[in-house]
């Protein structure tokens, strides 16, 4: 059982990742390639991709066993910024972390001789790993990335809209039955008994196309708390995915920011409603303001944002005024 302990401060700092994380999808999709249990959603994908992955699997598979522990350094926080940002972070992993985490992996799994060189931070071995990650993404994930992104964006919008309308605790209840919210603890079935104390840091939820049944958490509690969970395939009608007219024009995230402003709000409230960071909300608001779609006014320490007539017209298709 996994038990994640929240405080009031943790609830305020809990959010959903803004986009798919390519390194988490790499690890979890590789697990699915080797999964023998039939699953209609993934069976066709497995047949098409297994042959393409053969070359990179020889390098990646020993580091990503289908059951149990795999090293935290393979899924750094920087992966949220895209594949190359994530790979750069992997290649920059401190030697002490490499040594510790490869050692943990070796305690339960036979590793090839080159894994010892990886543990020592040998540059050529690290670059070989980075190239394998790129090749795997290009051959296995990139052809399916549109579907992956669509599923994850739909899930993200569902969770963040619930959080905006009803609060974080109600959003936590949407994860049932995979996760169970029993205030102030979030529970999940897990291979081992584990308690995670968020200690005021909040929790970053990462929706995943390839995560199945059991959520995944980082082992090192000194790292920022992350929980990867299965993205939903279907959503209640009232909380559907973003407006299909706006997402191709503005991008999913900026469309979400504009939609969140159907109710005037501060930058902090906007960030929470749209499911983005404070800096991202501020940046998107600036772009929308320059385009004449929103108006912003400062009141003491807070910036308040509202839709303009043009913004409302674009959002609703109804001419205002």
Image: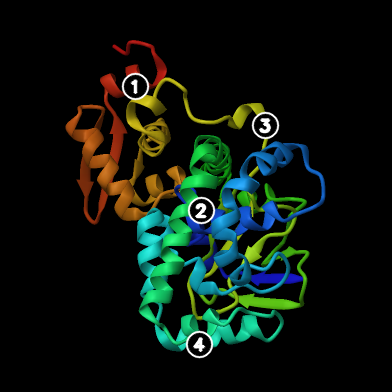
Q: Which residue is mark 1?
A: 312
| Relative image position of residue 282 (x, y in whole percent) | 27, 48
Q: Which residue is mark 3?
A: 236
Relative to 238, 143 lies left or right: left
The residue under the point 55% across, 66% down is: 59
Say which of marks 1 and 3 sits in front.
Answer: 3
Q: Which residue is mark 2?
A: 136
Task: Mark 3: give few (<14), some (14-19) or many (20+) Cα within 10 Å.
Answer: few
Q: Could one spot residue 143 in this view of the protein?
A: yes
Q: Dot 4 lies on which element?
A: helix
Q: Quadrant of the N terminus?
A: bottom right
Measured as percent of width and height from the top left, residue 218 is found at 58, 71
> Residue placed at 60% from the left, 78% from the top?
112
Residue closer to the observer: 98 or 170: 98
> Counting residues from the N terminus, which is met first, the one under dot 4 or under dot 3?
4
Q: Nearer the viewer, mark 1 or mark 2?
A: 2
User: Which mark, by number, is residue 99?
Assistant: 4
Label 4 near label 2: C-beta < 8 Å? Answer: no
Q: Nearer the viewer, residue 46 or 245?
A: 46
Category of crowding for the residue at label 2, using alpha-carbon neighbours closer than 10 angstroms: few (below 14), some (14–19), many (at least 20): many
Q: Earlier in the sequence, mark 2 or mark 4?
A: 4
Q: Position of residue 90 (x, y in %)?
A: 42, 70
């Amino acid at each position: 059982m996994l038990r994640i302990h929240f405080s009031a401060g943790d609830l305020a700092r809990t959010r959903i990742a803004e986009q798919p994380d390519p390194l988490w999808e790499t690890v979890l999709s590789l697990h699915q390639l080797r999964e023998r249990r039939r699953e209609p959603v993934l069976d066709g994908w497995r047949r098409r991709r297994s042959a393409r992955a053969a070359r990179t699997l020889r390098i990646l598979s020993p580091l990503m066993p289908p059951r149990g522990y795999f090293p935290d350094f393979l899924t750094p926080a920087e992966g949220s910024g895209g594949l190359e940002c994530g790979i750069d972070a992997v290649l920059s992993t401190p030697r002490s972390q490499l040594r510790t985490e490869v050692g943990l992996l070796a305690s339960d799994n036979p590793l090839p001789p080159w894994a010892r060189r990886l543990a020592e931070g040998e540059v050529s071995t690290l670059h070989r790993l980075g190239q394998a990650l790129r090749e795997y993404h290009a051959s296995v994930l990139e052809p399916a990335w549109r579907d992956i992104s669509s599923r994850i964006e739909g899930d993200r919008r569902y969770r963040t809209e619930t959080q905006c309308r009803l609060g974080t605790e109600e959003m936590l209840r949407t994860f049932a039955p995979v996760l169970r919210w029993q205030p102030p603890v979030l529970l999940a079935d897990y291979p081992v008994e584990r308690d995670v104390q968020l200690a005021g840091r909040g929790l970053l939820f990462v929706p995943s196309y390839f995560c199945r049944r059991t959520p995944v958490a980082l082992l090192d509690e000194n790292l920022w708390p992350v929980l990867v969970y299965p993205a939903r395939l279907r959503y209640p009608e009232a909380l559907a995915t973003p407006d299909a007219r706006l997402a191709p024009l503005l991008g999913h995230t900026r469309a979400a920011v504009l939609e969140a402003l159907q109710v005037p709000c501060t930058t902090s409230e906007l960030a929470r409603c749209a499911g983005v960071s404070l800096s991202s909300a501020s940046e998107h608001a600036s772009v929308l303001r320059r385009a004449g779609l929103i108006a912003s006014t400062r009141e003491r320490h807070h910036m308040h944002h509202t839709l303009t007539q043009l913004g409302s017209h674009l959002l609703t298709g109804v001419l205002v005024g």
